[in-house]
Amino acid sequence: MDKPRLYSGMQPSAESLQIGNYIGALLNWKSLQETHDAFFSIVDLHAITVAQDPAKLRENTRRTAAQYIASGIDPDASTLYVQSHVAAHAQLAWVLNTITGFGEASRMTQFKDKSAKQGSDGTTVGLFAYPILMAADILLYDTVVVPVGEDQRQHVELTRDIAARFNTRFGDTFVVPESSIQKETAKIYDLQNPLSKMSKSAESHAGVIWVLDEPSVTAKKIMRAVTDADGGVVFDRENKPGVANLLTIYSTMAGRTVQSLEDEYAGRGYGDLKKGLAEVVTGTFGPIRARVIELLDDPAELDRLLAVNAARAASVADATLARAYDRVGL
Ligand code: ADP
Ligand code: NA
């Protein structure tokens, strides 16, 4: 039997990915690519739903691609491409716009959050239609599995509703993706504010670990992470969110159980825990950083890889788009 189809993506919204992207997405993708026919996109069309500097966007797109590859996404086994290189995304999104209710789209909580940040002048129709473009991304590849975080669950549900509606109205066209998020992935919090999710778009970068930071910078950030006055290395999300966050990062990056870390650091201070964690993180990100620098050093080869992958993506996406156009009467 063929491997189940999988689709996921990330926005090229910063020069570097942060450790939450690595643990919550890339590590997971790396193992899923073994068992799935995986499509991994760098979603630049999504990125322009908020203002972007054109030169920086182009640069960040290439850097994000390099970080996917350096983190272990295999561009031969998986299809790793830039969303805007495959025209069918924008084309199918338009068709899906026309069968999505305005009220239905208005209920997306991520839009409410993002538009509150942008203000009414900064909030574009593109930002509003973001989830419908995401539906197009998923449906173009006859996707079964969509490994995304909890914050994207509502968008996957919308995708299912749109696909089912289209199929009912125009005849069987789209595969309706699975609703549930496949695997529980760890959620990483800001080192300076362990109650808020670490994010590329955090206002302050003091508590963000970047994949491409110099090892000394990463170590300093970890040593300065907010903890508590209790002193015990114990996993207690409610009462010790800072320490719990460090243990989560440590455990996922080192591939060890939290219990074994608690045992190792019992009776030792947070300083030791942080030192150990800094070693693990810089030990993982050091080679990734070196590989990214190497990949960016040969832009022609990186562009060639992305072009080959975009062509492979387009050959699947164009067939789905043709089917949808035909059904609608275009
Ligand atoms: P960011 O907030 O850094 O811009 P995105 O919203 O672009 O991240 O998410 C890209 C991917 O990274 C998604 O799969 C998301 O679930 C994952 N991700 C982002 N931040 C975290 C985090 N703090 N912990 C775990 N996973 C995360
Ligand atoms: Na983001």
Image (tube, rainbow, N blue to C red):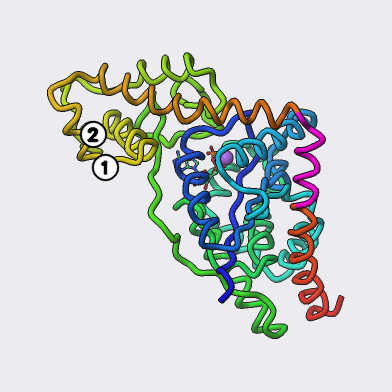
Q: Residue at the far right: name it.
A: 330
Label 2 belongs to which residue? 261
18 w.r.t. 69: above or below: above
- Which residue: 53% across, 64% down? 145
Q: Which residue type carries mark 2?
A: Leu
Q: Which residue type carries mark 1?
A: Thr
SS label for mark 2: helix
Q: Is residue 328 visible?
A: yes
* For the residues bearing labels 2 and 1, Cβ distance under 8 angstroms: yes
88 w.r.t. 21: above or below: below
When asked about the image quadrant of residue 129, the answer is bottom right
Q: Residue at the far left: name it.
A: 267
Q: Tell me where the magenta segment starts and ends, as one range.
A: 298-308
- Which residue: 74% across, 26% down? 297
Image mark for residue 5: none
Front residue of this view, candidates 165 and 213: 213
**What x and y, as percent, mark residue 97?**
72, 64
Image quadrant where one finds the C terminus: bottom right
**What x and y, as percent, mark residue 107?**
54, 58
Image quadrant where one finds the N terminus: bottom right
Front residue of this view, candidates 114 and 229: 229
Q: How many marks?
A: 2
Q: Is residue 116 visible?
A: no
Label 1 belongs to which residue? 257
41 w.r.t. 207: above or below: below
Asked if the magenta segment contains residue 219, the reply would be no
Q: Is 71 on the left-hand or right-hand side of 218? A: right
